[in-house]
Image (tube, coloured by chain):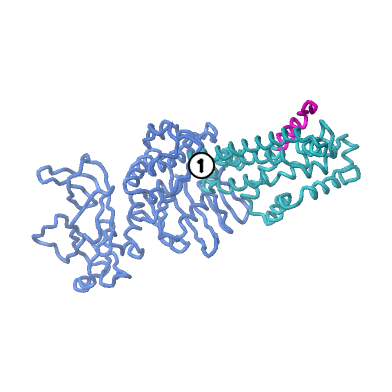
Chain colours: A blue, B cyan
Amino acid sequence: MTRLSGHFTLRRGGFVLDTAFDSAGPGVTALCGSSGAGKTSLLRCLAGLETPEAGTLRVGGDVWFDAARGLSVPPQDRSIGYVTQEPSLFAHLTVEDNLLYGFRRLAAPARKTTLDDVVDGLGLKALLPRRVTNLSGGERQRVSIGRALLRSPQVLLLDEPVSALDVAGRADVLRYLRQVLERFAVRSVYVSHDLREAARLANEMLWMERGKVVAQGIARDVLTDVRLPFAELDEAESLLDGVIEGHDAEMGLTRIRCANTMLWLTQVDAPVGSSHRVQIAARDVSLALSAPGAVSVLNVLEARVSNLVVAPRQPAQMIVRLDVAGQPLLARITRKSALALQLQPGTPVWALVKSVALAE
Amino acid sequence: MTPALDLTPLALSLRLAAVTAVILLILGTPLAWWLAQGRSRVRFVVEALVVLPVVLPPTVLGFYLLQLLGANGPLAWLWSQADVRLVFSFTGLVIGSVIFSLPFVVYPLKSVFEKVPRAQLEAAATLGARPLDRFFSVAVPASLSGFIAAAVLAFAHTLGEFGVVLMLGGNIPGETQVLSIAIYNHVEQLQYSAAHVLSAGLVAFSFVVLVVLHFTHDRRKAAA
């Protein structure tokens, strides 16, 4: 898979992007950070829409940018698909002609996909003859994604593709996006301010702050990094990979194996043996020093404390990162409890998980 | 009874206006695009030069063009080299009209070009379109109303010009005697009815053009 590496120094007004990056892939790399962290600027530099004052960019085996040599491949000569938050569809063209805009400008041997494939993957069949002016927000974004995919890009760059949409549009676009990213297996960079949303699409995550990439790793590790502001939020959560082991129809539950442990969740409609990610909210995890006896909580996991910090903005709260047979799990408990239990890195604990759900 | 009305000036005016409009669209389009999208510092100087014909009396413009293009002017060598007469000729009128009506083409185009969203041009670039391709496939279709306005204004403005033509072209029937000059001649010779017919025709024509222009503008606005 295509590796993206290099560094950029870009000054725009008061903002400075000054960072190195190296993302080997494969699949989707999420580029996260709060707004103003420089995510879009970095993406625009990758696309060639901004020319940094200094830096380099290597994509796979090619050099796309090298300020020292005065080399900057223009956007039209980079093999990219670029999807923006507000889709810039061409109002004078139909949906079909919008989709084919990049495809028609591609030499035949470079075309790795067809209109039919993309239309099918994004559910665009019924929209083809329509003007783009009267599409819904979600439909417009699907067309925009399709147009980028038909460019057969080496790298697909997605800049907050769902954050301008309403709830229904967002779910709709994310569902199709997940489907086509899997189907076309295209190397992607997905910019989002929403770590939670990004973690559901990405294998690898980069976290940016003030114009720099400050953390990087596989998605579930970055998501549970206690140094990052996400861990402190109410919606802080962990994602665990698991395989469905069976269903208990009578109790209405499904059993899923994650690492060495078994988790119960409300019965889901998924075949036995299929792989899934489950989500566990940090606030739904309680800790005990010894194996609890009779408790109502179904899911009790053996774990070990990796590290713990006081929530910077909520000093009564402690964020504890656990290691559950190699997979990270966040727990949020009070500082008072953490003191009472004398938690330290390395302390063996039992994690009582109140609620588990499939991550969608 | 007055002699039969000579319509040659009308035909000449229409031909001049059409040729001028076509040349202006060809020259004005890249200029307007550069003014709208460019970041060069000399832009302001060029912009002032383009507007100059609006504020100057046409006679001033005509006078300097006469100096420039005349038999003793810096471009006089063209007379002998290419056997082109630049003054007292239709060619001269075209040159004068192009300069005189330039702002009426550049301005409507510049204003629509400025409204072409940058994001659309960037999207086209990321989809493999080169600058010229982006211009024709994205900017032009988004700017049709501006092209219509520019063409109509260039045509109508040329049709109505007098001062520049008088200075540059003189009054040669069939060659440089355009409608406005012919009307002037008729009035000078107290042929009021002939002046009436031509003047009323010009008023009616201009009115119809403006109605059509506003109508299409309105329709395009409604469609957008």
Q: Is residue A126 left or right of residue B152?
A: left
Density class for disc 1 (Cα within 10 Å; few <14, some 14-19, many ≥20) is few
Q: Position of residue B197 (x, y in %)?
A: 72, 32
Residue A152 shows in the view: yes
The mark total stands at: 1
Up-down: is B175 above or below A207?
above
Nearer to the camera, A166 or B79: B79
The residue depicted at 55 percent of the width and 48 percent of the height is B115
Q: Secondary structure at mark 1?
A: helix
Up-down: is A101 above or below A301?
above
Q: Position of residue B137 (x, y in %)?
A: 57, 38
Q: Is residue A212 left or right of residue A245?
A: right
Residue under circle 1?
A: B221
**B13 falls in the magenta region:** yes
The residue depicted at 81 percent of the width and 35 percent of the height is B176
Q: Is residue A347 left or right of residue A91?
A: left
Q: Chain of mark 1?
A: B
- Residue farthest to the top, as pictured: B4
Q: Position of residue B133 (x, y in %)?
A: 59, 39
Nearer to the camera, A43 or B135: B135
Span of residues in magenta = B1-20
Magenta segment's dominant SS is helix
| Disc 1 residue type (three-letter) | Lys
Q: Position of residue B3 (x, y in %)?
A: 80, 27
Nearer to the camera, A205 or B44: B44
The residue depicted at 76 percent of the width and 28 percent of the height is B7
**A64 falls in the magenta region:** no
Quadrant of the frame with the N terminus of chain B: top right
Nearer to the camera, A20 or A305: A20
Q: Quadrant of residue A329?
A: bottom left
Up-down: is B179 above or below A19?
above
